């Protein structure tokens, strides 16, 4: 008989963070005696095979630890899908703490309703856009973080395998697979939990998360944006070419300053300290997230090689002003986080 839920954790070089997370999950599972309903599967593609992972899987039969070859993040998630035998999967980042009450609530929900997808908020009192209330299917566009997604395993795996050849190394195959699954399945039962179901970066021992952040490198960041642009533009122009209603709704969701300003801000920052070395395509410039002004800036930096634009933005800090005018809360939060990092370095 299938278990209800597998908590699936892809990980890489975060041994202390991972150990704390697994110990926490064991405590919750044992406390509520839900081991017959839950599996915990870890796929670890760490560079060093000699990392001291505690051998929990030898003591607890509901834990499976896989040491995987380093074939990228997307393959690491596929390893979890291949090992899973439960009906549903909750993807969870290694540093993310699943809230105890939320886990119990989700188990009850899955055992009493036939669902295909649950959006599980990582924020307190998540605000649901009116568009999402009108059509719950649109929630799938907010699944960018692993731990916001609980999916029906078999149908999700099939869709993931279909997309993997075209989008491997994007870090986003799971994101694309959920979107396609929700929009192209004939019948979907979608639900959502707006209370905070998990806490991001709760287990971040010794700054292990910061050491492995892929987006600190310009080539990596632009390559992933290329994949994202390829998927979204295909989604708009091919998948729904004759469905103007969905296309318009999609544009309302994705074309917003909360996405585009932080993205462009990071590109400019990384471009000022890194050269583009391994980028042969600039498809990210046509990403539907960007406004006309932002597209003009990107084209001048990457197509026209007009570095005066980049230097002007860098030295006048004019884009910081643009950021703080339109997204003051996000800018201030990022600024405070930078101060904390500087402070921690000074204390070393």
Image (cartoon, rainbow, N blue to C red):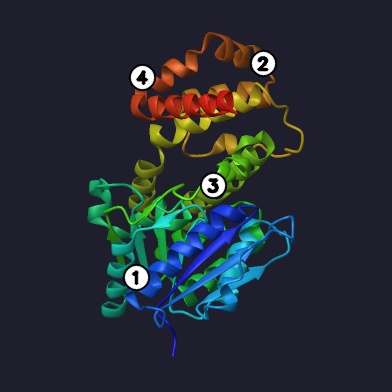
Q: Earlier in the sequence, mark 2 or mark 3?
A: 3
Q: CA distance from mark 4 to mark 1?
A: 40 Å
Extreme-right residue of the structure: 277
Quadrant location of the C terminus? top right
Residue 279 x %, y %: 72, 38
The reply to whether the C-beta atoms of the residues labelled 2 and 1 are less than 8 Å apart is: no
Label for residue 307?
2
What is the secondary structure assignment of the residue under circle 3?
Answer: helix
Residue 240 x %, y %: 44, 55
Taking the image as shown, residue 306 lies to the left or right of residue 253, namely right
Label for residue 188?
1
What is the secondary structure assignment of the residue under circle 4?
Answer: helix
Residue 56: in sight, yes or no? Answer: yes
Residue designated by label 4: 325
Q: CA distance from mark 2 to mark 3?
A: 40 Å
Residue 254 x %, y %: 41, 42
Quadrant location of the N terminus? bottom left
Residue 292 lies, with reference to residue 222, above or below; the image says above
- Tell which of 132 and 204 is nearer to you: 204
Taking the image as shown, residue 303 lies to the left or right of residue 256, namely right
- Tell which of 338 and 284 is nearer to you: 338
Q: Earlier in the sequence, mark 4 or mark 1?
A: 1
Q: CA distance from mark 3 to mark 4?
A: 35 Å
């Amino acid at each position: 008989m299938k278990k209800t839920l597998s908590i699936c954790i892809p990980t890489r070089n975060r041994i202390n963070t991972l150990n704390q997370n697994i110990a926490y999950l064991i405590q919750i599972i044992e406390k509520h005696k839900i081991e017959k309903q839950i599996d915990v599967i870890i796929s670890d593609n760490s560079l060093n095979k000699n990392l001291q992972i505690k051998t929990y899987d030898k003591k607890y039969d509901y834990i499976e630890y896989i040491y995987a070859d380093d074939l990228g993040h997307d393959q690491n998630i596929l390893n979890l899908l291949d090992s899973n035998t439960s009906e549903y999967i909750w993807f969870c980042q290694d540093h993310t703490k699943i809230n105890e009450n939320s886990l119990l609530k989700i188990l009850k929900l899955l055992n009493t309703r036939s669902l295909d997808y649950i959006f599980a908020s990582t924020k307190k009192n998540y605000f649901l856009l009116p568009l999402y209330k009108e059509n719950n299917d649109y929630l799938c566009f907010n699944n960018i973080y692993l731990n916001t997604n609980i999916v029906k395993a078999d149908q999700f795996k099939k869709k993931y395998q279909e997309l993997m050849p075209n989008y491997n190394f994007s870090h986003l195959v799971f994101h694309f697979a959920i979107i396609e699954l929700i929009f192209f399945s004939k019948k979907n039962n979608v639900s959502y939990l707006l209370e905070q179901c998990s806490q991001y970066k709760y287990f971040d021992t010794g700054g292990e998360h910061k050491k492995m952040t892929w987006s600190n490198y310009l080539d990596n960041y632009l390559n992933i944006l290329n994949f994202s642009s390829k998927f979204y533009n295909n989604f708009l122009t091919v998948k729904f070419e004759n469905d103007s209603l969905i296309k318009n709704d999609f544009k309302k969701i994705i074309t917003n300053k909360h996405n585009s300003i932080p993205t462009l801000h990071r590109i400019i920052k990384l471009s000022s300290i890194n050269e583009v070395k391994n980028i042969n395509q600039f498809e990210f410039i046509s990403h539907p997230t960007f406004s006309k002004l932002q597209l003009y800036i990107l084209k001048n930096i990457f197509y026209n090689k007009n570095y005066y634009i980049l230097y002007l933005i860098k030295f006048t800090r004019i884009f910081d002003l643009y950021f703080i005018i339109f997204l003051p809360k996000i800018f201030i939060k990022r600024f405070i986080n930078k101060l904390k990092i500087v402070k921690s370095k000074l204390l070393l």
